């Protein structure tokens, strides 16, 4: 690639001599000559310069002042002094002030090697800085993931309490009343908060997912009214679903999170009035059936530089305080976890289109694509040991299960769980519900010890942790054995009945 050189030189003959010397040595370059400090500064600020050659002393400029300007405007730009006369003291002074090298005009045989060395060193510095930036981003993501994984457990406990209580309120209120509507909004807000937790946990090493065959078409249609509430009056939402179901293997929460992030990103790109179009469908590519989702806007669009970095974590073009730079990075990670691919097309002033492709999945019951109807809480009469360290959550769960006819023994840690179980050995519990990360003794270890003496004991683990955090405790759990927080009381009681009704 041609090297762009800015040459501060008042003598056209000397400038021509230097150009011919570089070309004779096989150096491919374009030289722009200036002879005043003002012109030199303007050229620097325009950019596109790879290297500076400067005479040390000339009528319309001063080499040391040019060096100072270059270091101020472009600190890493290679700067070589090429002068007919420069004393040793001045040469040393220029090097101490940031010059890369100096060459005497009567020794131009040194010029091309010096230029090549200066450019190589500059490239090496850029590579090191780039690696350093990548390492910093990786460390930032590592720290972010650890923090997210650590806070998720407590946060999900709180959300479970709020969701369960809002569910109890709704169960005791007539549908359509003002109070029922308020309770419903609380539960909806908890669902959005749970989605935020999932988004944070994308950047920890792993997290719980409930992958299933879902109908993308149904999810897009069901989400339309919710997405419309996210948009201001000046932005129109147009949804074009396909004819019939579009089955893919995915996690419902992941899909909803991707859809929300893409719509919010499109919303922010529209400066005045505009339209966001969502289209779902299927295509054939390389004899494979694929399902696609497109989110298009007619907003500001992106430059090629922004488009190249749009999926980088923490990269954002929004003002400080207006964006985290995690939305699109989250989308890509979630889509990759579903074996999908996301691409972007955009041009300044012509809007942006994000396109996602997934492999089509076989069949599917179709019910997963519908908004679940509030489930009734089935009753029971069995004895249950409930081990949960959050006393508010434990008391609420125990109280509701007792109202449904269950006999509930409570424990706040793994050691207490062993003691409570031992005290009821004549009529032991048939089911243990245990948080994975109990104090003193983990829920998993407590269950392992209990099953030694009671091999037929049924188990349901609960957890608000990521899979990585669970693995750090020394064990892994099959997805079906864990009820992920936050959950509703209806989800809890339905899972209990499934476990107790299943044949061993």
Image: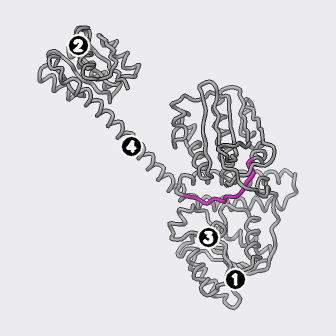
**Real-space CA distance between mark 2 and mark 3, rounded to the nearest whole angstrom:** 80 Å
Q: Nearer the viewer, mark 4 or mark 3?
A: 4
Query: Under tag 4, what secondary structure?
Result: helix
Query: Under tag 1, what secondary structure?
Result: loop
Magenta residues (range):
206-216
Q: Which mark is residue 435?
A: 3
Query: Under tag 2, what secondary structure?
Result: helix
| Side (left or right) of 116 relative to 47 | left
Residue 55's quadrant in the figure?
top left
Residue 356's quadrant in the figure?
top right
Which residue occupies 69% across, 42% down?
Answer: 293
Around disc 4, counting alpha carbons within 10 Å, would you say few (fewer than 14), some (14 to 19), or many (20 or more)? few
Frontmost residue, 72 versus 336:
336
Which residue occupies 72% across, 59% down?
Answer: 163
Q: Is residue 364 above or below residue 127?
A: below
Q: Which mark is residue 17?
A: 2
- Residue hosting label 1: 429
Q: Is residue 478 visible?
A: yes
Q: Is residue 186 visible?
A: no
Q: Position of residue 125 (x, y in %)?
A: 32, 37
**Real-space CA distance between mark 4 and mark 3, rounded to the nearest whole angstrom:** 41 Å
- Residue hosting label 4: 131
Q: Nearer the viewer, mark 1 or mark 2?
A: 2
Q: Is residue 417 magenta?
A: no
């Amino acid at each position: 690639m041609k090297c762009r050189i800015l040459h501060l030189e008042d003598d056209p003959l000397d400038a021509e001599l230097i150009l011919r010397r570089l070309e004779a040595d096989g150096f491919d370059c374009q030289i722009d000559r200036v002879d005043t400090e003002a012109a030199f500064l303007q050229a620097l600020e325009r950019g596109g310069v790879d290297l500076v050659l400067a005479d040390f002393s000339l009528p319309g400029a001063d080499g040391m002042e040019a060096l100072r300007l270059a270091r101020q405007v472009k600190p890493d730009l290679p700067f070589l002094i090429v002068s007919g006369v420069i004393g040793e003291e001045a040469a040393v002074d220029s090097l101490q002030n940031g010059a890369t090298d100096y060459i005497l005009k009567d020794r131009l045989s040194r010029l091309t090697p010096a230029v090549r060395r200066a450019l190589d060193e500059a490239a090496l510095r850029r590579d090191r800085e780039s690696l350093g930036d990548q390492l910093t981003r990786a460390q930032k993501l590592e720290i972010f993931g650890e923090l997210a994984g650590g806070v998720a457990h407590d946060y999900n406990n709180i959300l479970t309490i709020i969701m369960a209580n809002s569910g109890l309120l709704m169960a005791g209120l007539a549908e359509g009343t003002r109070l029922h509507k308020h309770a419903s909004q609380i539960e909806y807000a908890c669902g959005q908060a749970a989605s935020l937790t999932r988004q944070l946990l994308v950047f920890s090493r792993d997290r719980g997912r409930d992958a299933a065959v879902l109908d993308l078409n149904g999810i897009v249609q069901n989400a339309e009214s919710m997405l419309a509430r996210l948009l201001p009056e000046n932005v129109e939402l147009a949804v074009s679903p396909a004819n019939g179901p579009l089955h893919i293997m995915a996690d419902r929460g992941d899909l909803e999170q991707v859809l929300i992030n893409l719509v919010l990103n499109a919303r922010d790109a529209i400066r005045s009035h505009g339209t966001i179009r969502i289209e779902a469908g299927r295509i054939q590519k390389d004899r494979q059936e694929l399902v696609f989702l497109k989110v298009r806007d007619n907003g500001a669009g992106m430059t090629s530089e922004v488009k190249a970095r749009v999926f980088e974590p923490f990269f954002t073009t929004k003002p400080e305080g207006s964006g985290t730079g995690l939305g699109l990075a989250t989308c890509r990670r979630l889509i990759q976890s579903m074996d999908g691919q996301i691409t972007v097309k955009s041009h300044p002033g012509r809007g942006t289109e994000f396109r996602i492709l997934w492999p089509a999945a076989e069949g599917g019951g179709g019910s997963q694509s519908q908004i679940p109807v509030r489930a009734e809480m089935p009753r029971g009469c069995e004895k249950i040991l409930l081990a949960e360290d959050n006393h508010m959550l434990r008391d609420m769960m125990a109280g509701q299960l007792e109202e449904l006819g269950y006999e509930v023994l409570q424990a706040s840690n793994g050691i207490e769980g062993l003691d409570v179980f031992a005290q009821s050995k004549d009529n032991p519990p048939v089911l243990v519900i245990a948080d994975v990360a109990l104090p003193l003794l983990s829920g998993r270890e407590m269950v392992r010890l209990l099953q030694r003496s009671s091999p037929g004991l049924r188990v349901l683990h609960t957890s608000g942790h990521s899979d990585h955090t669970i693995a750090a405790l020394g064990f892994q759990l099959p997805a079906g054995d864990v009820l992920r927080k936050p959950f509703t009381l209806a989800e809890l009681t339905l899972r209990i009945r499934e476990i107790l009704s299943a044949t061993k």
